[in-house]
Amino acid sequence: MAFNDAHSSSSVCTPTRYGILTGRYYWRSRLKSGVLGGVSPTLIEPGHLTVPAFLRQHGYRTACIGKWHLGLKWALQSELQPSGHQRGHF
């Protein structure tokens, strides 16, 4: 099988990944422009069925590998350090 003609609703990664994983146009999310980083709130709404979740329901195993840029709510390193500990001194 060869795909010779493909289109994306956006020229950057976050909206494109959102569309591929959810089957929805990215402008239906809270993201209206740009990309998200690792500390951003999750863009995919809790409970929204994604392609990987659908595949898992049917016995497939899925994983997240590589760039994500859909928000993971990761803590900043400064938030993980004990109070009084200065940044950059380990």
Image (spheres, rainbow, N blue to C red):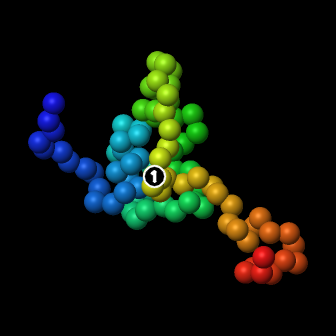
- Please tell me which residue is depicted at 33% across the width and 60% down the height of the picture: 12
Q: Residue furthest left?
A: 4
- Please tell me which residue is depicted at 77% across the width and 64% down the height of the picture: 80
Quadrant the N terminus occupies: top left
- Please tell me which residue is depicted at 70% across the width and 68% down the height of the picture: 77
Is 29 or 21 nearer to us in this picture?
21
Q: Is residue 12 left or right of residue 51?
A: left
Q: Residue furthest front?
A: 90
Residue 79 placement (x, y as % from top left): 75, 67
Q: Residues within 10 Å of mark 1 (few under 14, many from 20)?
A: few
Is 79 or 19 nearer to us in this picture?
79
Name above or below for residue 8 compared with residue 46. Answer: below
Q: Is residue 50 left or right of residue 75?
A: left
Query: Could one spot residue 79 in this view of the protein?
Result: yes
Q: Which residue is mark 1?
A: 66
Name above or below for residue 56 compared with residue 28. Answer: above
Q: Is residue 34 left or right of residue 38?
A: left
- Please tell me which residue is depicted at 49% across the width and 19% down the height of the picture: 59
Query: Could one spot residue 49 in this view of the protein?
Result: no
Residue 46 placement (x, y as % from top left): 58, 39
Tag 1: residue type?
A: Gly
